[in-house]
Amino acid sequence: MPEIHIKRLDLGLPLPALAHEGDAGLDIYAAHDGVLASNGGRLLMPTGIAIAIPLGYAGFVLPRSGLALNHGISVVNAPGLIDSQYRGEIKVVLLNTDQNRPYHVSRGDRIAQLVIQQVENVTWTEVTELDSNDRGGGFGHSGR
C-alpha cells in the first residue's frame, strides 16, 4: 500500500475518506459553496487538499454515482487525472447535466471520489505493420 503525503489547505474540511471498508474511491469535499447552472453549467471546485502521489502511481477523480443519478452532476473530464508530480490543490470540474434544475453545492459536501492507482510507463516501438489481432470496428461496433 503506497503512503500518500497530504497537506490540508483548509483545516475545516475532513481528509478524503472511504465510505465503507473495501471501497476503491475516497470521498473528497467541496471547499466552498457554489451553484451549477442547469443545462451544462460548470464549476471549478477546490477541495482544500494537496497530495504527493509517489512515482508509479496516479490519482483519478471520478463522479459520485448518487450525485449523477439523483441530480445529473458529473465530473467534466472524468476521470480527472492527477499526475505524480502535481503538488497543487486538487480541484474538481463539476458539470450539471440536468436540463431544468440548478444544483447547489455546500461547503463540506462530498463532490467526487479520488482513486489512487498504480500506472505503468511504456516504451514505444515503431513498426510498419501491427499484428493481425484486429477485432475491427469500435464505437459500438460489437452491438448492444
Image (cartoon, grey):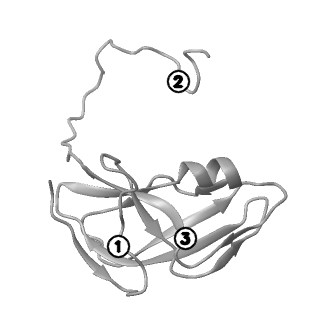
Secondary structure category for the residue under label 2? loop
Q: CA distance from mark 3 to mark 1?
A: 12 Å
Q: Whole-percent x and y of residue 7?
A: 28, 81
Q: Looking at the image, is 4 positioned above or below residue 12?
A: above
Indicate left or right for 26 with 64 as reference.
left
The residue positioned 68% from the left and 51% from the top of the image is 70
Q: Whole-percent x and y of residue 43?
A: 63, 71
Instruction: Report the amino acid beneath label 2.
Output: Gly
Residue depth check, mark 2 versus mark 1: number of the one nearer the observer: 1
Which of 128 and 67 lies nearest the eye of the viewer? 67
Secondary structure category for the residue under label 1? loop
The residue positioned 85% from the left and 58% from the top of the image is 100
Indicate left or right for 9 with 119 as reference.
right
**Residue reaching furthest to the right:** 100
Mark carried by residue 80 = none
Mark 3 touching mark 1, by CB under 8 A?
no
Kindly identify which residue carries mark 3. 109
Earlier sequence position, callout 3 versus callout 1: 1
How would you rate the neighbour count of disc 3 (Cα within 10 Å): few for under 14, some for 14-19, many for 20 or more? some
Instruction: Report the amino acid beneath label 3.
Output: Asp
Kindly identify which residue carries mark 2. 138
Quadrant in the rendering for residue 94: bottom right
Indicate left or right for 139 with 131 as reference.
right
Instruction: Report the amino acid beneath label 1.
Output: Leu
Earlier sequence position, callout 3 versus callout 2: 3
Kindly identify which residue carries mark 1. 15
**Residue reaching furthest to the front:** 20
